[in-house]
């Protein structure tokens, strides 16, 4: 089956955040799991380079918009590579091909006569790049995501009316219960759709925001950053020359909870206006919070930098942390201490199991997994271990990833317990028990290989190193000891 999976395209107005790393890794795990069952998967990520926020950041950095966007976008590309989550295509909305697709969409909307030009007065949050209603703000009148008061703005813009599509969207959600996952976020969308929808402003006067795609039929206006950004999901497939309909029919957007409205309200309506169906799934996850259960910020000193974290713990340990520790339907904490303790568990449990197994195979059987006829009891253990490899093929959504990570640790623990109970070192001392020793070594060798295969989508390098080490007969250090 052809499948398409996307991260949001990130704002490169600053450096990448650990949250960006998280979404990218989750997509990559899904991609690898689906590829393992022979799906043809296209995975895209990229950078969202327009809008007021980018314009202000480039000015503050004293760089031209292009120089700033090149430099910052490269940081995101670098992070994806360091995470071993290299996409099939890394889109930048500053690409000419993308602008052409955006023009095509706008011209089509214009020709169909569905756009309205009018004056609008409202409260604008630059952080969200969205107009806000009073009811979106906290008691102080601040945006809840950005903790800043939105600014009042009055300007003449083009609008896409959303209200004519509200009943259709409600029905679509009812008819497609798996479209938005998990359920708690679907409730949020249904609440947003409980009241009439305001028209979506899809342009900005060039006099205020110069950083954007120029309108094809009005040179005084640039395209609103969200309208332009959402279309990236279509542009990427076009640039790749992929069979659009087949991939779109099984397309998955993975996003954080902060951008539900654009993805679950604006985007399906934009697609419908253009004559396309919604992407088939939207997987939403909660936010990582820093020490103190608050948003990470430099002034609080609770920022977890993805580059530093990879340098300290390694890519696979971070990928495993994401897979195992993030609560999808809620926010979760991420701190240095939590990362360190997750690393210790991984090293002492899974890493240690590998090392113990390898050392025993080395000592008692020339680093080879013996081909021993198995007892009924061992056959059952092996069957249980083998089942986890099949579970990779069952991965459908983000919560399945967490189940797999949990099972890997549970089975590693059980295998460590199996070694303690079987005591291969005692069997080796008794000549009459050598057959039994070979059986135990067979269970351990095969077992660790099954676990490595199961872990492959989450920790691709680690899995590869384990499998290779049995071919080369050279043990590998998976999770080196760290200084605290
Ligand atoms: O919203 N925890 O870009 P963005 C978990 N350009 N995930 C987090 C996170 C955190 N603390 N912080 C960020 C934009 N993310 C738009 C998207 S798409 C057409 C346009 C992740 O740079 C999460 O996936 O603000 C979130 O939705 C995304 O980064 C927001 O990235």
Image (tube, rainbow, N blue to C red):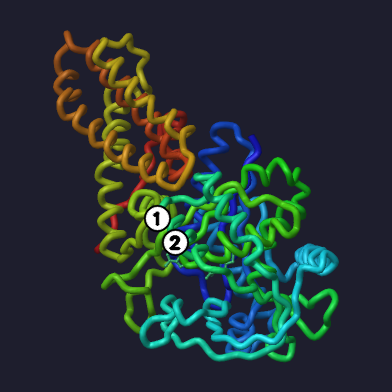
Q: Is mark 1 within 8 Å of ligand 1?
A: no
Q: Report which quarter residue 176 is drawn in.
A: top right
Residue wearing tag 2: 188
Q: Residue 175 vs residue 383: left or right? A: right
Quadrant placement of the C terminus: bottom left
* Residue 110 locus on image (x, y percent): 82, 69
* Residue 239 locus on image (x, y percent): 76, 55
Residue shown at 44% from the left, 78% from the top:
135
* Secondary structure state at the residue bearing disc 2: helix
Residue shown at 29% from the left, 31% from the top:
357
Residue wearing tag 1: 184
Q: Number of callouts in the render?
A: 2
Q: Dot 2, crowdedness within 10 Å: few (<14), some or many (≥20)?
A: some
Q: Residue 289 vs residue 230: left or right? A: left
Quadrant placement of the N terminus: top right
Q: Dot 1, crowdedness within 10 Å: few (<14), some or many (≥20)?
A: few
Viewer-side residue, 450 vs 50: 50
Q: Does 381 appear above or below 420?
A: above
Viewer-side residue, 182 vs 139: 139
* Residue 440 locus on image (x, y percent): 26, 20
């Amino acid at each position: 089956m052809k499948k398409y999976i996307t991260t949001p395209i990130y704002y490169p107005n600053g450096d990448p955040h650990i949250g960006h790393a998280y979404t990218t890794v989750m997509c990559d795990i899904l991609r690898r799991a689906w590829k393992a069952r022979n799906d043809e998967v296209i995975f895209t990520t990229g950078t969202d380079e327009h809008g007021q926020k980018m314009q202000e950041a480039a000015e503050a950095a004293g760089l031209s918009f292009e120089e700033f966007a090149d430099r910052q976008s490269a940081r995101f590309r670098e992070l994806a590579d360091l995470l071993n989550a290299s996409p099939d295509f890394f889109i930048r909305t500053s690409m000419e091909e993308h602008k052409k697709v955006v023009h095509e969409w706008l011209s089509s909307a214009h020709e169909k006569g569905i756009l309205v030009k009018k004056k609008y007065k409202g409260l604008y949050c630059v952080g969200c790049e969205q107009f806000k209603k009073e009811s979106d703000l906290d008691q102080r009148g601040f945006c809840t995501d950005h903790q800043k008061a939105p600014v009042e703005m009055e300007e003449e813009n083009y609008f896409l009316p959303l209200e004519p599509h509200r009943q259709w969207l409600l029905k679509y959600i009812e008819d497609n219960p798996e479209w938005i996952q998990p359920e708690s976020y679907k409730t949020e969308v249904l609440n947003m759709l409980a009241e009439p929808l305001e028209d979506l402003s899809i342009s900005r006067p060039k006099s205020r925001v110069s950083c954007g795609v120029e309108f094809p039929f009005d040179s005084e206006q640039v395209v609103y950053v969200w309208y332009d950004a959402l279309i990236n999901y279509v542009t990427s497939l076009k640039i790749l020359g992929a069979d659009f309909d087949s991939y779109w029919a099984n397309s998955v957007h993975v996003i954080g909870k902060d951008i539900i409205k654009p993805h679950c309200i604006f985007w399906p309506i934009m697609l419908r206006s253009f004559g396309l169906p919604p992407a088939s799934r939207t997987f939403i996850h909660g936010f990582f919070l820093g020490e103190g259960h608050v948003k990470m910020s430099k002034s609080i000193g609770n920022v977890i930098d993805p580059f530093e974290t990879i340098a300290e713990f390694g890519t696979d340990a971070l990928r495993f942390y994401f897979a195992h520790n993030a609560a999808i339907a809620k926010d979760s904490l991420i701190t240095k201490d939590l990362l360190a303790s997750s690393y210790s568990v991984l090293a002492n449990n899974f890493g240690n199991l590998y090392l113990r197994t390898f050392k025993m195979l080395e000592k008692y059987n020339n680093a080879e997994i013996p081909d021993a006829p198995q007892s009924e009891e061992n056959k059952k253990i092996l069957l249980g271990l083998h089942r986890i490899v099949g579970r990779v093929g069952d991965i459908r959504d983000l919560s399945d990833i967490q189940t797999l990570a949990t099972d890997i640790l549970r089975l590693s623990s059980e295998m460590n317990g199996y070694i303690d109970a079987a005591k291969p070192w005692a069997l080796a001392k008794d000549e009459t028990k050598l057959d039994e020793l070979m059986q135990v070594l067979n269970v351990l060798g095969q077992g660790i290989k099954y676990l490595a295969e199961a872990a492959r989508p989450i920790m691709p390098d680690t899995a590869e190193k384990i499998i290779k080490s049995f071919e080369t007969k050279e043990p590998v250090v998976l999770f080196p000891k760290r200084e605290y």
